[in-house]
Image (cartoon, rainbow, N blue to C red):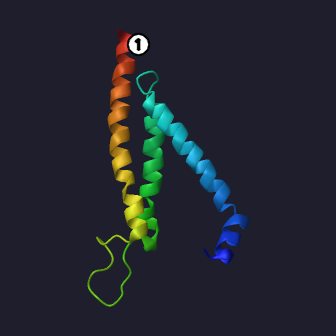
Amino acid sequence: MNQAHRQWHGTNGTYRFSYGLGIAIIFIALLIAMHPLFPPVGSLLLVLMACTTLSFLVTTPEAWVPALGDGAHGFPYLSGVGRLIIKDTIMFGAALVTMADSASSYLQRVHG
């Protein structure tokens, strides 16, 4: 563990933000788990979160393998950061499925 990095993250609020983000993700997960009872609020929040995270593939150069002298770099070669980001496509798809299911359940309850 690099103590200088840890101190920098502590000073700049990285850990507080990370804890808050974790709580928000758990809250969204709970809303999705209860999707038959509520309109698709949790799924919509997850779609927004996934779109935000996936935008990092375009805005963050570290998401792609850097040019290190061979031909295997840039698009479509994802770095470790890019592979961490791409997992949100699965969450995005799952959110669309649960959103459609919860919207269908809600409409059936409301309109009988």
**Residue 46 image offset from top left, x and y in percent:** 45, 42
Residue 65 figure quarter: bottom left
Answer above or below: position of 33 versus 86. Answer: above
Q: Please state which of residues 59 and 20 is positioned toward the viewer in this rendering.
A: 20
**Residue 30 image offset from top left, x and y in percent:** 50, 34
Outermost residue on the bottom side: it is 69
Q: Please indicate whether residue 52 sits to the left or right of residue 68 in the image.
A: right
Label 1 amino acid? Val
Q: Please indicate whether residue 57 sits to the left or right of residue 17 in the image.
A: left
Give neighbour class at mark 1: few <14, some 14-19, many 20+ (Cα, 10 Å).
few
Residue appearing at x 54%, y 38% in the figure: 27
Answer above or below: position of 5 versus 31. Answer: below
**Residue 19 image offset from top left, x and y in percent:** 62, 51
Residue appearing at x 43%, y 59% in the figure: 55
* SS for callout 1: helix
Question: What residue did someone put label 1 on?
Answer: 110
**Residue 94 image offset from top left, x and y in percent:** 34, 41
Residue 15 figure quarter: bottom right
Answer above or below: position of 74 versus 92. Answer: below
